[in-house]
Image (cartoon, rainbow, N blue to C red):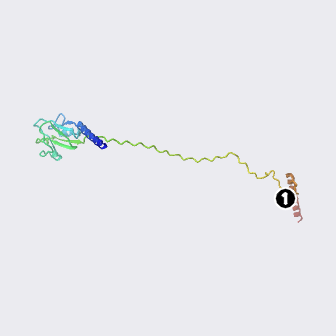
Amino acid sequence: MAGNKGVMSLLVIVVLATVSGICSAKSVVVGGNTGWTLPPSASFYSNWASQQNLLVGDVLVFNFPAGAHTVAEVSKANYDSCTTATTVGPVITTPPANITLTTSGSHYFVCTVPGHCGLNQKLTVSVTATAASTPTPSATPSPKKSPTPISSPVAAPTPAVSTTPISPVAMGPSASSFQMGPAAVGGPASGAGSAPPPAGNFAAATGVSILSLLSVVVASAVLF
């Protein structure tokens, strides 16, 4: 079923293109109001042809008095040399001569009456391919994927700083209350159970002992 639908769609496109090409075809009178005759100037028909936009399927209409002129399509070589003995198509002697342009490219026409081609009764036209064409449907663009957001690096947690003051480690009696026993200065040990002398007495005794020692040293030096 799907295959049949595809074939039918293709046939419809071909028919529409053909009908469109036929409808767009036009009839063009060669030379306009002057018609097909001995031209008023050597460049008359070349100037006229340069202003035309001829497509495949268009019809050239050659108007001329019966018995006065003819028209026939020839090769480029015969066109350049005005040789009319050999023609591409039949020689048309009855007006109006309607010639359908069936192929693209350059086409060459001359009047086969002797001497008329040499007097520039000849025409070159350029035909382009038919403009009727079925546009190719553009592919539906696929939806764009939204870019994946780049995750920001997770910051390492900041260690909590304790605000609780650290109490100093107890290191025994403070210097202000430290008491040295008599053994520290070489004094006799106190009796068992006796309380150590007060700090003031110890300092005074220590000072007196040092002064006594100095006195002895000085006296010995004097004697010797």
Residue visible at 18% across and 43% down in the picture: 108
Seen as rendered, the residue at the extreme bottom is 224
Q: Quadrant of residue 101?
A: top left
Q: Which residue is mark 1?
A: 183
Q: Position of residue 161 (x, y in %)?
A: 65, 46
Q: Count every numbered label the image shows and give the total.
A: 1
**SS category of the residue bearing label 1:** helix
Residue type highlighted by circle 1: Ala
Q: Position of residue 39 (x, y in %)?
A: 16, 38
**Is 223 placed left or right of 79 in the picture?**
right
Q: Position of residue 221 (x, y in %)?
A: 87, 63
From the viewer's perspective, is residue 209 above or below residue 8? below
Q: Quadrant of residue 182?
A: bottom right
From the viewer's perspective, is residue 153 above or below residue 186? above
Residue visible at 22% across and 42% down in the picture: 126
Foreground residue among 214 and 157: 157
Q: Answer whether residue 213 is visible to the viewer in this image.
A: yes
**Is 135 placed left or right of 207 in the picture?**
left
Which quarter shows the C terminus? bottom right
Q: Answer whether residue 132 is visible to the viewer in this image.
A: no
Seen as rendered, the residue at the extreme top is 33
Q: Quadrant of residue 60?
A: top left
Seen as rendered, the residue at the extreme front is 1
**Is 150 placed left or right of 131 in the picture?**
right
Q: Position of residue 1 (x, y in %)?
A: 30, 42
From the viewer's perspective, is residue 7 above or below residue 207? above
Foreground residue among 160 and 218: 160
**Is 153 placed left or right of 96 in the picture?**
right
Label 1, residues with CA under 10 Å away: few <14, some 14-19, many ≥20: few
Foreground residue among 113 and 92: 92
Foreground residue among 80 and 204: 204
